[in-house]
Image (cartoon, grey):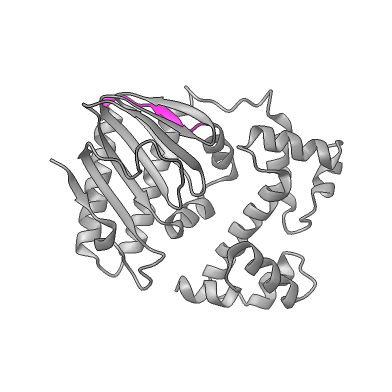
Amino acid sequence: MDKQINSRQCKIANNSKTKYISIKTDSDSLPFTFNFTEIVKDSILIACTKGEMEIVIDNITYHMNQDNVLLIFPYQRLTVTYKSNDFQGMFLQYSDYFHETIMIDLPYFFLIYYQQNLIYKLNKSLIGQLKLYFSILENTIKNNNFYTNQIINHMLHIIYYDLFNFTHPQNSIDYKNNKIAYDFFNLLKKHLHESKSVSFYAEKLCITPKHLNRVVKDNMRNKSAKEWIDFILIIEIKKSLRDKKNRIKEIAESYGFASQFLFFQYFKKNTGLSPNEYRKLNE
């Protein structure tokens, strides 16, 4: 039987357009249209419990069978090209609000790892653990109390930490071939408040900005160094904005913006919202 909390029933907290989560367990249906290419707007975790499925994500083909877990992130292009008649799986789909919260709190190390590894082979024990987590999420959403968002956020963190803890030995980061990308992220973490320039980080690595962009793009799912700087910076700014104790003027200054106007302009260009609008949306 297909147990599902429909996303229309799972819009929670005070902004139903941005905060939602959908859960399916023991389902033979997919949250995508078969053999149709689409760009997903949500984060999706698929755990195959029976049968097989083939899915193309950003031109890379992934073959899923029993006990495989696949992670899909916002704005990836995907096509489901094959699904066996006996396919069954568990699906966790959640909006960008929860994705942002996870990205804000996870170490940069995880960002590198999850960009390089989208599919994992689990054991029966961890598949059972995922079912338990899904059940807890279902009950949390049904009860919908004052701390629902916080509980969902913590459960999503637990899921990702558990996946990382189990799969890291089988899918370790290729430091040798990706040393420049790895060193770039370490420098970004250290100097983000200091500089947003690709040239700054390229100079630290003793390479040209063009070479840094190419290496990062080749190893980090087609995102350039500049795109990653903006991505990480926006995550950090959002983290600061969620803490109401931080004044917007102080946030702008701490990240090296010459004026609040330039800060507002940069944030709106990358998010579609002003800092005030974002803060209000996430109250």
Is the residue 169 above or below the residue 43 in the image?
above
Left or right: 117 in relation to 183: left
Image point (52%, 37%), residue name: 114
Query: In the image, is residue 189 above or below residue 1?
Result: below
Question: Is residue 244 visible in the rendered structure shown here?
Answer: no
Residue 172, given in percent of the width and then of the height, sits at 54, 25
Quadrant, the C terminus: bottom left
Q: Horizontally, is 274 left or right of 55 in the view?
A: right
- Residue appearing at x 56%, y 42% in the figure: 111
Q: Residue 81: image x %, image y %?
A: 39, 30
In magenta stretch: residue 68: no
Residue at the extreme left: 1
> Horizontal placement of 247 versus 207: left or right?
left
Kindly indicate the quadrant of the structure image that contains residue 129.
top left
Q: Residue at x 70, y 37 (%)?
A: 216
Residue toward you, 45 or 134:
45
Q: Is 122 included in the stretch rendered in magenta?
A: yes
Q: Nearer the viewer, residue 131 or 158?
A: 131
Residue at x 47%, y 52% (from the top left corner) = 102
> In the rendering, at what x and y percent does residue 63 appear?
40, 24
Residues rendered magenta in the picture: 117-124
Quadrant of the snapshot with the N terminus: top left
Give the residue furthest to the front.
36
Q: Can residue 45 be seen from the camera position used here?
A: yes
Q: Position of residue 232 (x, y in %)?
A: 63, 53
Total numbered circles: 0
